[in-house]
């Protein structure tokens, strides 16, 4: 298989993510309208995320990466790898949560569906396909595996710059957050060969970070300060240390 073809597949999926995450609501907005702006906005994004996720899933099966994400194996899951990222992320979000506004049940439902679609598309695309395609490109020796995880996490972080609505330091914090999450999640996937739990963890992270704005069509986004950006990265630094710990557990593993 041509190395160029592998890179083109990665580029295709990343382009798909960038285009539809940036302009998908504009393209589909005229076709879906219930009169509830909050519901419509999140429904459109949910449909886009699920569609891209299904394309990525098809690319995974075509490339034979099913084993690496747990689709074709019934082996048990070592849940302890997921305890720290799950509990720490929820506690951080709860600690900084503003009062939750009044909401309708359909808003809560669509928010949960939307957050689940984020977990699905991001984990299937970036960890399930891109990371495993990079491992196939660079090789399955430990340095190559670590390089693949790092590149995948970096690409994942860069994708979070699409909106650029939080100010310079806010975007720095966002990229730092995504990079640390990407490193720890990438190592976790390689060790566990299970992507479903990571989808759920990502869903919980997004749900608890967005629930304080449930029902608000255009939530106010504050411009982050230098100090705020540094504080966020420091609070998330355990993910970096956890990723380094997981890296020490990685050994060359062939199916």
Image: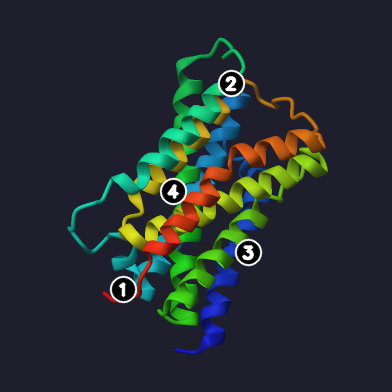
Question: In the image, which is nearer the foreground, mark 1 or mark 2?
Answer: 1
Helix, strand, or loop for circle 1? loop
| Residue 53 in sight here | no
- Sequence-wise first label, 1 or 2: 2
Q: CA distance from mark 4 to mark 2?
A: 24 Å
Q: Which residue is mark 1?
A: 253
Please report the residue visible at 44 percent of the width from the left and 56 percent of the height from the top.
Answer: 245
Residue 200 percent across, percent down from the top left: 39, 41
Nearest the camera: 46 or 219?
A: 219
| Residue corresponding to mark 3 | 15
Question: Given contact means CB atoms under 8 Å apart, are the residues at marks 4 and 2 in contact?
Answer: no
Badge 4: residue crowd in 10 Å (few <14, some 14–19, many ≥20): many
The residue tagged 2 is 97
| Left or right, 199 with reference to 216 | left
Residue highlighted by disc 4: 120
Q: Tell me, yes or no, whether the two marked residues, 3 and 2, touch with CB atoms within 8 Å.
A: no
């Amino acid at each position: 298989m041509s190395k160029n073809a592998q890179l083109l597949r990665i580029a295709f999926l990343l382009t798909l993510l960038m285009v539809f995450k940036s302009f998908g609501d504009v393209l589909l907005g005229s076709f879906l309208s219930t009169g509830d702006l909050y519901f419509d906005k999140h429904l459109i994004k949910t449909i886009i995320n699920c569609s891209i996720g299904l394309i990525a899933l098809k690319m995974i099966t075509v490339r034979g990466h099913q084993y690496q994400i747990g689709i074709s194996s019934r082996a048990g899951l070592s849940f302890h790898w997921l305890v720290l990222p799950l509990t720490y992320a929820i506690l951080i979000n709860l600690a900084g949560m503003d009062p939750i506004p009044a909401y309708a049940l359909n808003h809560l439902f669509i928010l949960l569906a939307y957050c689940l679609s984020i977990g699905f598309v991001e984990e299937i695309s970036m960890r399930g396909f891109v990371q495993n395609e990079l491992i196939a490109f660079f090789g399955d020796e430990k340095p190559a595996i670590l390089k693949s995880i790092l590149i995948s996490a970096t690409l994942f972080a860069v994708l979070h710059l699409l909106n650029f609505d939080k100010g310079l330091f806010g975007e720095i914090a966002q990229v730092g957050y995504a990079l640390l999450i990407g490193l720890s999640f990438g190592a976790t996937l390689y060790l566990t060969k299970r992507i479903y739990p990571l989808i759920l963890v990502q869903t919980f992270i997004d749900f608890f970070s967005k629930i304080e704005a449930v029902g608000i069509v255009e939530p106010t986004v504050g411009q982050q300060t230098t100090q705020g950006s540094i504080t966020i990265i420091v609070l998330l630094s355990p993910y970096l240390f956890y990723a380094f710990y997981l890296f020490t557990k990685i050994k060359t593993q062939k199916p």
